[in-house]
Structures are given as C-alpha cells and as structure tokens.
C-alpha cells in the first residue's frame, strides 16, 4: 500500500514508518519537524516537509495514498491544561483538516494515534476498551473527540479507521537505528536516563503515598517497537476485514516509578539519583491496559516491553547521542 505517515519523523512515528517500510509498503513521511528529527525518517521512505494545518500541502501529499497513519499531535497532558488553545489548533483543528483532506482525495484507511488519556481516572483495572471515557486533561479530550469523529466518518463516509490507544510509550529501536531524543522530556523513562547520565541532577519521584505495592505511581510501559507492529497489523486488518475498530495497546502489567528506577540502575550499572517529592497534580495512582482485544482482533502480543529491553534500548539512544560520559 501507499501510506502517508503524518508525524513520521517523531518518536513513535519514526518507529512506525520504519516498520511499514520494512514490510514493503511505500511510505511518505509528512512532518513539520517541530518536535521530530529529519534523521529519524527511515531510508526507503520519502520525506515531505509540511504542516497538517495546510490544506493544499495536505491534499498534495495524500493524493494517491491508500492509507493514512496519523500521529501529528502535541502530547503533553500537563501543558494541555495550561495552553488548551495550542491543543485545539493542532490536535483538533489541524487534525480534522488533514482527515478531511484525506477523505477528499479518497484515502480509504486511517490509523489514528489515540491515548490511554481518553479514560481519565480508572474505575477498574485492567482498563479495557469499554471502560468509561472521562478524560481528566484537555489532551485526552482532543484524542477522544477525534475518535468520535472517526466513528461518524466510518458510518457516514465509509472511511475505515483504527484508533490505537497507547499506554506509556517507551524504549527505542532495539537495533539502534533510531536515536532521536525528545527535547526537554517530562516522561519517566527519559527523565531516569537523564539522571543516570548527569544531564539532570535527580529524578523527582512524584509521591510515594499511593495505594500501590511501593506507594509510587504504576503505569503500563509499552515499547515503541511493539506499538509500531500494532500499526502494521491494524493496516492489515483494515485492508482485509474492512471494519473500523478501537483497541488499547499495553502489556496488561504495571511497573511503579521505583521499579523503573531500580531496574534501570541495576541494568546500566549506575546509581539513578532520586528523591521523593509531592504528587504531580492529575496523576492517577495506577493505570494498566487489558491487551485482550488487541490480541484477539489483531494477534498482537508485545515482545519488547519488558523493563530491561525498554531501559537498555533507551540507554543505547542516550549513548548514541554522546550523553553518557
Ligand atoms: C509515569 C509515572 C509519574 C516523571 C503521560 C501522558 C499520557 C501519555 C503518556 C501520550 C507517573 C511518574 C514521571 C518524573 C515521576 N501520553 N514520574 N517523575 O503521566 O503516565 O502519561 O505520558 O498519550 O497522556 O499523561 O507518563 O512518564 O509522565 O509518568 O515520578 O519526573 O512516572 O508520576 O506515575 P504519564 P509519565
């Protein structure tokens, strides 16, 4: 298939683009490089520099594509609460504009990057697809809105879509081919890496009084290579079954902040300086996914999402960037 990957120079998008090229698809990466890296675009993929909010450029890049993988969005939940307009512009307006361009030029299939943030505070665990959707941040709301638009476009326009709700994406290509780091990371795994290599003084552990096995927050860390595989499988499903669907992508297991800090320290053979501080506002105690539907529907099973692989592949990316002295 010819596939446009919007946001394909970004952290998750570049892993997805690489997997699609490997599987023999014709891939066009469309990215404005606001957070992505040109060097992360895999060999074998075409690159078009442009913005999803530009309808002319959008129609041009999408013309002739069978499928669109859409990852071009802001993703910092905290920031979405202080600068919602930034999220309205990109995650709603520009996303809709690009989806409409895709519809106009006859793109048949859409794979959309959604998020565990659509659920909000968990009512039960593991979180399955039917769990109530009640986002606690504006970022999650934007993802849920686009999911809803896609459900309507399926019904009204016959545009078939897969909404993939990522839990906590982490890790880097195990073969070391993608090493682009995020600028000013706020997510736990890169923060742990930065503390281990002295780029930051320490990890602030946001609370140790949660109702979890060690009191720190528990999350479902899913390796980007596993996420990339899910995108390929989602496209195959859309092409062969012709039915839209929504799935959660997680491992079904949770790791606490201290589990991550301790495993990382052991694995890389260095201390990870850390300090318990107060809770971060809006953080639920524990979140993990049910991976049952993804397994049943797509045959998707995470293979790289153990903590050792997540930490060692991320550490390798930090080394490749010359940050490990
Ligand atoms: C993980 C755990 C923190 C940093 C966010 C978005 C979510 C999704 C993934 C895209 C929590 C703790 C973290 C630190 C810490 N994004 N932590 N010290 O908040 O689960 O999810 O990224 O879809 O929408 O909200 O991820 O990596 O920030 O935090 O103690 O310096 O690590 O409290 O328990 P989060 P995270």
Image: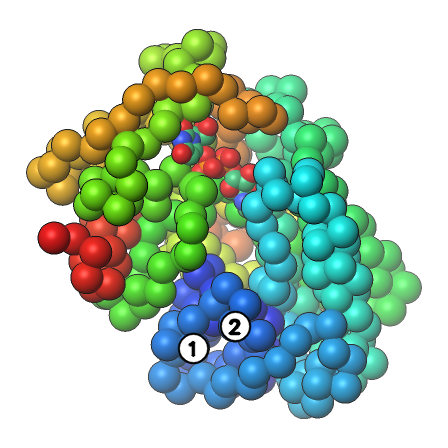
Is 130 left, or right, of 228 in this rendering? Answer: right
Q: State the image coordinates of residue 212 (x, y, percent, origin top left).
A: 42, 14
At a point 39% along the width and 38% down the height, the residue shown is 188
Residue 36 drawn above or below residue 128 = below
Q: Of the numbered discs in the image, which one, if any, rests on residue 38?
A: 1
At a point 59% along the width and 63% down the height, the residue shown is 71
Residue 116 visible somewhere in the drawing = no
Inter-mark Cα distance, 2 to 1 = 7 Å
At a point 70% along the width and 46% down the height, the residue shown is 83
At a point 64% along the width and 24% down the height, the residue shown is 121
- Tally the numbered discs: 2
- In contact (CB < 8 Å): disc 2 and disc 1: yes
Which color scheme does this rendered protein use?
rainbow
Is 144 left, or right, of 289 in this rendering? Answer: right
Which quarter of the picture shows residue 112? bottom right
Q: State the image coordinates of residue 79 (x, y, percent, origin top left).
A: 61, 43
Residue 320 visible somewhere in the drawing = yes
Q: Residue furthest left?
A: 269
Within 10 Å of disc 2 (Cα), the crowding (few <14, some 14-19, many 20+) is: some
Q: Of the numbered discs in the image, which one, if any, rests on residue 18?
A: none
């Amino acid at each position: 298939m010819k596939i446009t990957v919007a946001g394909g120079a970004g952290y998750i998008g570049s892993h997805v683009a690489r997997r699609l090229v490997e599987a023999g698809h014709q891939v066009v990466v469309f990215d404005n490089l606001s957070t992505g890296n040109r060097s992360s675009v895999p060999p074998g993929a075409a690159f078009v520099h442009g913005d999803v909010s530009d309808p002319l450029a959008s129609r041009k890049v999408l013309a002739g594509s069978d499928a669109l993988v859409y990852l071009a969005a802001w993703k910092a939940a905290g920031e979405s609460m202080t600068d919602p307009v930034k999220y309205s512009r990109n995650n709603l307006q520009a996303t809709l504009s690009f989806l409409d361009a895709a519809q106009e030029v006859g793109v048949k299939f859409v794979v959309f990057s959604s998020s565990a943030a659509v659920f909000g505070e968990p009512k039960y665990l593991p979180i399955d697809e039917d769990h109530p959707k009640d986002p606690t941040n504006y970022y999650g709301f934007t993802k849920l809105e686009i999911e809803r638009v896609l459900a309507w476009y399926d019904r009204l326009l016959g545009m078939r879509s897969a909404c993939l709700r990522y839990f906590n994406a982490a890790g880097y290509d195990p073969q070391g081919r993608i090493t682009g780091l995020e600028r000013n990371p706020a997510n736990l795994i890169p923060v742990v890496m930065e503390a281990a290599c002295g780029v930051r003084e320490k990890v602030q552990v946001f609370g140790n009084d949660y109702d979890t096995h060690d009191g720190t927050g528990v999350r479902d860390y899913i390796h980007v290579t596993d996420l990339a595989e899910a995108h390929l499988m989602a496209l195959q499903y859309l092409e062969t079954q012709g039915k839209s669907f929504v799935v959660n992508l997680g491992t079904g297991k949770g790791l606490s902040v201290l589990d991550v800090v301790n495993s990382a320290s052991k694995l890389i053979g260095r201390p990870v300086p850390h300090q318990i501080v107060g809770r971060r506002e809006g953080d639920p105690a524990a979140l993990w996914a049910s991976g049952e539907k993804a397994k049943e529907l797509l045959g998707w099973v995470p293979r790289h999402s153990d903590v050792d692989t997540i930490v060692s592949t991320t550490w390798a990316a930090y080394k490749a960037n010359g940050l490990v002295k």
